[in-house]
Image: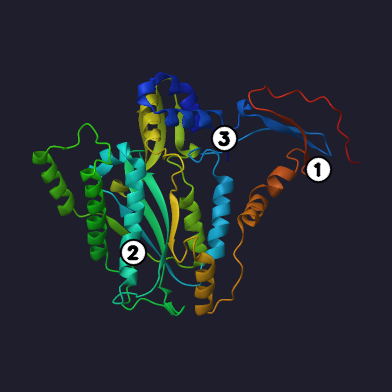
Amino acid sequence: MRPQLEVAQVIDRFLHQLPDHKLTKYHRRTLKAIQACRTASLGGHVDACDSCGHLRISYNSCRNRHCPKCQGLNKEMWTIQQEDQLLPTTYFHVVFTLPHELNGLCLHNPRFMYDLLLRSSWYTLNTFARDPKWLGAKSAATMVLHTWGQTLVLHPHVHCIVPNGGLTSKDEWQLPKRGNAKFLYPVKALKKVFKVFFLKQMRLALEQGLLILPPDFPSKPARYHPWKENLYAKDWVVHTKKPFAGVQHVVKYLARYSHRVAITNHRIKQIDQQSVQFDYKDYADRGLKKVMTLSGKDFIQRFCLHILPPGFRKVRQYGFLANASKTKDIAAARKALGRKHKQLLQRAERKVLAKLRLFSQKVDRCPCCQKGKMILVYAFIANKDPPVYHTAITHSK
């Protein structure tokens, strides 16, 4: 069901209240794109039914990755890619989370901090995979970065999907040498490796002056050393979940997380002259669904916390799923697991399949008579009002 309220309406009502110094140019440009999405300002086209003559005006999408309305096609393409690459084995789910003490550095250095979070997560998993004591093989992981919590506060974490085993140098499939129903490797040890690697790389960047320091950062030695020691002493969160029941469950889960934005339109419940109400799950209270009210300005500012830097890849694949070697390695893994080899789909093929899955019935069939096909009869360019179409349409008898 189409939501009655949208993030675009919040932006439309409250964006003018935020002075220029409160938002970067990139954030404002992203918000403007979401605001204009599927409106006449981006142009569109007119379709007509070849049976009953029904007209339908469709406006163009902004295609911004932060837009709640524009993720359908990319999500479906990515899902098809994952289906194409899945192996007949168990998959595990693990989440690496940064402590809130690093939120200030994340806000001022999102590209560096989020890239380091993804690299540290893979370094940790790969360190254990390469260790003969645990696996001694080339592993893989699909990772998805999320930066938000349910109330739109900053909460950087990475969801990782990891297969049960890896490829040896002889292209044989190696299962874990120490059976563990919860995860491949000991979680306490994962936490330590993750924390030490991340903090070491961050400390080097700080010492080299590569990071922008937030105003409240403890830059003086008397404050910095206790702050650093507290981070080392803290128990960092590495959370594992139950293994997936089957390959199809992996696909469904990945689809849910891969192209998710900070908040969906369905969660917005009310917009008035001053505030926005939206629902959220309170995980501290047994996951109960509650409603939060924020001023319009605060809502937009929280939403902007999760606008990633231009060109930043929030979904990454490592190990034998990396682009450099995945064609060869996936073929070898399938052979080792007794699965017939097949050629991986190209991007153009995935796009065609995704469009068929999403749009074939919805776009082609007339919503009025349910018999005729909708045919493009006119396209209008951006920043123009949609035209009134007067040309007669031939009806099929």
On the question of residue 194 being in view, the answer is yes
x, y percentage for residue 360?
A: 70, 49
Q: What residue is pinned by disc 1? A: 372
Of label 1 and label 2, which has the lower sequence position?
2
How far, Cα to Cα, is label 1 from label 2? Answer: 54 Å
Number of residue marks: 3
Amino acid at pointer 2: Leu
Counting residues from the start of the chain, the first of labels 2 and 3 encountered is 3
**Residue at 34% in and 65% down:** 126
The mark lying in front, picked from 3 and 1, is 3
Say if residue 337 shows up in the picture.
no
In the figure, 177 relative to 382: above or below? Answer: below
Q: Secondary structure at mark 2?
A: helix
Distance from the alpha carbon under mark 2 to that under mark 3: 37 Å
**Of helix, strand and loop, which one carries label 3?**
loop
Q: Which residue is mark 2?
A: 125
